[in-house]
Image (cartoon, rainbow, N blue to C red):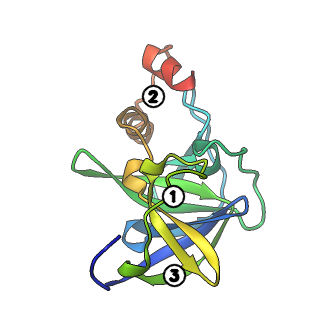
Amino acid sequence: MAEDNTMMQFLTFKLDDEVFALHIEKIREVLEFTTVTKMPRTPEFMRGVINLRGSVVPVIDMKQKFGMSYTEKAVDTCVVIVEVGMEGEKLVLGAMVDSVKEVMELESSAIEPPPKIGTQLNNEYIEGMGKQDDEFVIILDIDRIFSADELTIVSDMKGGRMSLEPDEEMAALHA
């Protein structure tokens, strides 16, 4: 995929039995799962918000976003605080995952393009595939996982601007 041999770092985590990774530069911190305040009229994968040192941070259930089952709270459940690019600005959100594994280093030349078939994820979300200990790791592009409409909803959640009135765009996201 990349032509040079730059060493890159990724945070790896699990959703069900699959191992995923995000660029370490996009990670702010990893938190133990905490109480999430549900917000009205949001898509199912938007679990709600948490208070992070006085800031409202929207929490996304990554398994539900990817069409998997609802993430149940368990001992290893974590919220990975990430920065997502939105129209030149950075939006902070929490990505709920089953467990965090480790920080992994890969040479950029070791990252392969995503498969054309055989994955339940939209290939737009996948930056590439890495391999560690004979296990494939799906490297996600966090900036491409959410649509502009979804990021607008997340931004509104963060700013406390969620409307309690029905909204056609919101209904379309639930469809």
In this view, 142 is above or below 153: below
User: Disc 1 residue type?
Assistant: Pro
Disc 2 or disc 3, which is closer to the eye? 3
Work out how far the residue at label 2 is from the one at label 3, CA to CA, in angstroms.
37 Å
Chain-order first, disc 1 or disc 3: 3
| Spot occupied by residue 67 in the image (x, y as percentages of width and height) | 64, 42
At 47% from the left edge and 50% from the top edge, which residue is drawn?
Answer: 123
- Label 2 or label 1, whichever lies nearer to me, is 1
Residue at (57, 43) in percent of width and height: 65
Q: Is residue 121 above or below residue 136?
A: above
Q: Could you tell me if residue 55 is visible in this image? A: no
Residue 137 x/y as whole percent: 57, 70
Q: Amino acid at mark 2?
A: Met
Q: Nearer the viewer, residue 44 or 175?
A: 175
- CB within 8 Å, label 2 to label 3: no
How packed mark 3 is, by other alpha carbons closer than 10 Å (few <14, some 14-19, many 20 or more), is some
Q: Where residue 162 is drawn, which disc sits there?
A: 2
Label 3 element class: strand
Discs 2, 1 touching: Cβ within 8 Å: no
Q: Residue at x 66, y 57 (%)?
A: 34
User: Does any portion of residue 5 appear in the rendered image?
Assistant: yes
* Crowd rating for badge 2 (residues with CA inside 10 Å; few <14, some 14–19, many 20+): some
Q: Secondary structure at mark 2?
A: loop
Provide the residue designation for mark 3: 104
Is residue 65 rendered to the left or right of residue 110? right
Tag count:
3
How far from the left and from the top, in percent, is residue 111? 43, 74
Q: Identify the mark nearer the N-term, 2 or 1.
A: 1
